[in-house]
Image (cartoon, rainbow, N blue to C red):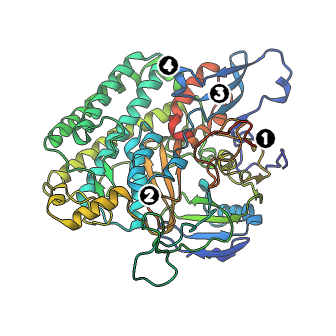
Amino acid sequence: MTAWSDLPGYVSERAGADMPTVTVERERIREACEYARDRLGFNMCVDVVATDYLDWGGKGVSGYIGTATGRDLNKPMTEGLQALPEPKTKRFSISYHLLGLRQGAPRVRLQCWASDGESVPSVVSVWPTCDWHERETFDLMGIVFDGHPNLERLLMPEDWEGHPLRKDYPLGGEPVRFSDAV
Amino acid sequence: MSTTIARTEIYEGTRIPARVPTILDVPPELRDNEDVLQVNFGPNHPSTHGVLRLIVDLHGEEVVGASAVIGYLHTGFEKTMESKTYWKCVTYPERIDYVGYQNNELVFVSAVEQLLETNVPMKATWMRMLLCELNRIHSHLIYLGTSALELGAISMFWYCFRERETILDLFELVTGQRMHTRYFQVGGLAEDIPQGFYPECRKFVEWMPHALDDYRGLLDKNQIWLERTVGIGKLSAADAIALGQTGPNLRASGVDWDLRRDAPYLHYDQVDFRVPVYPNGDVYDRYRVRMDEMAESNKIVRQCLDRLERMEGMPWIADDRKVVLPPREELHTSMESLIHHFKIVTEGFRVPAGEIYVAIESPRGESGCYLVSDGGPKPWRVHFRAPSFVALEATATCLHGTYVADLIAVVGSLDAVMGDTDR
């Protein structure tokens, strides 16, 4: 068993069906990654992914007649959830999926949390592969990585406005000209 | 935000460019040289395998600077999937990697199944394996045909596409579709395996070793092929790991790593196959790895057939009415089945809240699916770890000290699919 609590900036850990998730302080994620690479033998970072938890569980619990209070009787099952998911501490989670290229293929998910506008230290100096992963995350989710050598948009055009994978990004429509000049 | 970074070299003797790992900078002594010519290669160039754009600095014939620009095929699959119910989502991953579609389908379906804790029947698992391996052969044939074509071996293209055609016919026989089959369903397969598939597939399995001999005969001792590929586009094992390379590109750099053997999924632990590894990390070794892999995949297909032929009449999809559509004939006789059918089709099935990352060995390397569910019928967040995306990060390192003609060989050998890269 690996003692995850030795990781720099360790906050908490959680077992999972796929791999353990270790939450790490945002400011120390670079150190944690370096420690995981050098001391714990996770020599490959396979993926960096951010998730926007804006309005997580906001659909509420849908109701049906004859249940305990707290359910919205006017909401059919198609609109709400069966149970509220566990609330999240901050809006964005940034997950680093690490893999050890050795017997047993150990994996771990290092996770840190950021509010809108908070930046995350870049881990490009630990794993060069994170160059594009971080650029993609910046491009689509709007998370700024401090110390990234070339933090520009990757998939969207350079002059694109907004970050499409955010939950508050409009799904359709185009801006209407002069609509604000009443 | 600082634009420079004090980056100590991770490994001794790395060829990864230091400032930005994915950009090969023109060396300082050539910066103001009038002989250095900047050329835009792509995005619409037949040998870029889609819409990859490379900005290349040439000093004479020598490549002194390179950077890859991607995003021309960004379609927002991940965003679209957030507004579709799970069973509708299955069609999207296939279109992400449009050459290795069944593998991508599998990774998404497995992620949903793991969150649901659904048990997939044995027959479906073996059939998934069989189709994934046929798909791997299909993908490698496209790699081989196109990258040989780009180096002037036009006959390779016709030979490879002859066998590819047979594979597509097999897919059509099973699923009704030649590409993007949508045959894997959460819980198993969409339909039972049709009669007549096994003999047809067996014919292909018997034929494929002969076809591979043909390819080897055309290329293995071909002087032009050897001169264009041996020692070109080198990637060392340490650099490949640091750049997150997986699949054939990693194995061609001498790293013995295959998720099918090292972290078995489906029934890969019950079949007999070898993982080909070659040490040099050049274009030729990437070719050799893929050639050997086709032979190994063929062996796996044969073993799957042996098992599947004995599973006639067994269930092909899980018996879980909350997730799986009821059999068609029950809709006329059972009220419950009708309700279940209606609920799954209109509202979709609900997946317990949680997050999961599932990885499989696709033809291009580790294909991963990160899935977050809030407990509703639509995914909260889907993300695909695309092996092609990562493969293209290595272009700058591979192009170190090559000539402009090698560029095409190197890009072809990394075997990136742009749909997978841009998603």
Near mark 3 (Cα within 10 A), the count class, few <14, some 14-19 or many ≥20, is many
Near mark 4 (Cα within 10 A), the count class, few <14, some 14-19 or many ≥20, is some
Residue behind mark 4: B151
Disc 2 marks a residue whose amino acid type is: Asp
Q: Which mark is residue A94?
A: none
Left or right: B137 with respect to B194?
right
Q: Residue furthest bottom?
A: A68
Whole-percent x, y for residue B84 in the image: 45, 52
Q: Are marks 4 and 1 in contact (CB under 8 Å)?
A: no
Residue behind mark 2: B262
CA gap, disc 4 and disc 1:
59 Å
Residue behind mark 3: B54
Whole-percent x, y for residue B40 in the image: 67, 21
- Secondary structure at badge 4 equals loop
Q: Nearer the viewer, mark 4 or mark 3?
A: 3
Disc 1 marks a residue whose amino acid type is: Ala
